[in-house]
C-alpha cells in the first residue's frame, strides 16, 4: 500500500520541479569561460606576438642608431647626433650595419610580446573591476605585463645590442654571441640589466598604457564619428602619443641598460658594479648629466611609430579573432 502511494505520488508530473538554467546555456561550449573581452588568451598572445615582431623589425635601424649613441665615449661613435651616428654606421659597415642583431630581435620579440599582451589583458580583467576606463588598472596591468615579458626578452635584447655595436671580428652572429658570453661571462651576463630594464619599463609601460587608453577616450570625445568603430587612425594616434611620451621620460634608465648590456664590447669599458646608482655616476663622470639623455631623439622616433604600428596591428588581430570567434560560435550553436 505504501509502495503504491509512493509510485502514484511520483507519477504526477506536477510534482517534478524543473532545474532553472541560465540564459543561453550551452554546456558543450563551457570551455569559453577562459575568455576575456570576447577572446581566448591564446588569441591575445598570437595578436601580440605578431604585432610586437612587426613593430621591432620595422623600426630596427632606428634602434641601432640609438644603441650606438648610448654607448658612452669609448666606442667608435663619439658624437651624440643622430645624423653623425647614422653616417658613421654607414661608413664603417654599410647599410647592413643598421640590421646587425635583427636575428636576436626576431627570436625575442615574438615570445616576449605574446607574454606581454596576454598578461596585460589578464591583469586588466582582474584589476579593472568591470570599469573599462580605469586608468589606474591599465597602468598597474602594464607593470605586471612588463615584469613578465622582460624576463623573456632581456637575454635576447642583450645579444641584440652587442651585435649592434660589435663588428664581425667580435661576434659572427647570434649563436656565436651566446656561446662566447656563456663561456667568458657566465649565464648571469644575460640578465645583468634585468633589474634596470624592469625599473625602466615599469614606469614606461605604466605611462604608455595609461596614455594610450586616455588618448583613445579623448579622441572619442573630440570626434565620436572617427572613433566610433575603433578605427585604425585612433589606435595609431593613441599609440604614437603614448610611445613618444613614455620614451622620453625613461631615457636615462635606457642609457643605464645599454651600458650594462654592452660593457666590454667594441671598446666600451667594463663596469666595476652593476648597481644602478654606480652606473649613473660613471655616466655622469664621463659625459655629464647630458649623458643620461643620450639617444632620446632616436628613442622617441623609434617608440612613436613603433607603438602606432604595434597597437594598430594588435587591435586588428583582436578584430580578426572576434570575427573568427563569431563565425565559430554560430556554427557550434546551430
Image (cartoon, grey):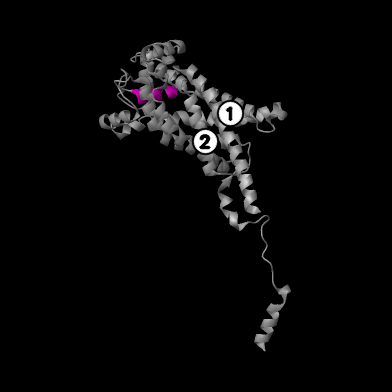
Residue 299: x and y in percent read: 48, 20
Which residue is at 35% across, 30% downward?
Answer: 192
Picture disc at residue 211: 1
| Corner quadrant of residue 155 | top left
Q: What residue span does the magenta drawing correspond to?
A: 252-262
Question: Relative to residue 77, is residue 332 depicted above or below?
Answer: below
| Residue 243 visible in the displayed image | yes
The crowding category of the residue bearing disc 2, from other C-alpha atoms within 10 Å (few below 14, some 14 to 19, many at least 20), is many
The crowding category of the residue bearing disc 1, from other C-alpha atoms within 10 Å (few below 14, some 14 to 19, many at least 20), is many
Q: Nearer the viewer, residue 109 or 218?
A: 109
Name the residue tied to disc 2.
48
Residue 278: x and y in percent read: 35, 23
Picture disc at residue 150: none
| Corner quadrant of residue 305 | top right
Question: Relative to residue 182, is residue 130 depicted above or below?
Answer: below
Q: Nearer the viewer, mark 1 or mark 2?
A: 2
Amino acid at each position: 500500500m505504501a509502495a503504491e502511494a509512493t509510485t502514484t505520488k511520483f507519477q504526477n508530473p506536477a510534482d517534478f520541479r524543473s532545474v532553472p538554467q541560465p540564459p543561453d546555456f550551452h554546456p558543450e561550449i563551457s570551455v569559453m569561460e577562459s575568455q576575456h573581452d570576447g577572446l581566448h588568451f591564446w588569441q591575445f598572445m598570437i595578436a601580440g606576438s605578431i604585432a610586437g615582431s612587426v613593430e621591432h623589425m620595422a623600426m630596427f635601424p632606428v634602434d641601432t642608431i640609438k644603441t650606438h649613441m648610448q654607448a658612452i665615449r669609448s666606442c667608435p661613435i663619439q658624437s651624440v647626433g643622430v645624423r653623425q651616428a647614422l653616417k658613421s654606421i654607414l661608413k664603417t659597415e654599410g647599410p647592413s650595419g643598421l640590421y646587425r642583431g635583427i636575428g636576436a630581435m626576431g627570436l625575442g620579440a615574438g615570445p616576449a610580446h605574446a607574454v606581454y599582451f596576454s598578461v596585460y589583458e589578464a591583469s586588466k580583467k582582474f584589476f579593472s573591476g568591470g570599469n573599462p576606463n580605469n586608468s589606474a588598472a591599465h597602468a598597474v596591468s602594464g607593470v605586471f605585463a612588463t615584469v613578465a615579458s622582460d624576463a623573456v626578452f632581456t637575454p635576447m635584447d642583450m645579444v641584440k645590442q652587442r651585435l649592434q655595436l660589435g663588428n664581425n671580428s667580435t661576434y659572427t652572429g647570434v649563436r656565436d654571441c651566446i656561446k662566447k658570453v656563456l663561456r667568458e661571462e657566465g649565464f648571469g651576463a644575460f640578465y645583468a640589466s634585468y633589474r634596470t630594464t624592469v625599473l625602466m619599463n615599469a614606469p614606461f609601460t605604466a605611462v604608455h598604457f595609461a596614455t594610450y587608453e586616455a588618448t583613445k577616450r579623448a579622441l572619442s570625445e573630440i570626434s565620436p564619428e572617427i572613433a566610433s568603430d575603433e578605427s585604425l587612425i585612433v589606435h595609431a594616434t593613441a599609440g604614437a602619443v603614448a610611445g613618444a611620451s613614455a620614451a622620453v621620460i625613461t631615457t636615462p634608465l635606457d642609457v643605464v641598460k645599454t651600458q650594462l648590456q654592452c660593457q666590454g664590447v667594441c671598446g666600451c669599458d667594463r663596469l666595476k658594479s652593476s648597481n644602478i646608482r654606480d652606473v649613473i655616476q660613471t655616466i655622469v663622470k664621463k659625459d655629464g648629466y647630458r649623458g643620461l639623455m643620450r639617444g632620446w631623439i632616436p628613442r622617441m622616433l623609434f617608440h612613436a611609430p613603433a607603438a602606432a604600428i604595434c597597437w594598430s596591428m594588435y587591435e586588428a588581430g583582436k578584430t580578426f579573432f572576434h570575427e573568427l570567434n563569431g563565425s565559430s560560435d554560430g556554427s557550434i550553436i546551430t
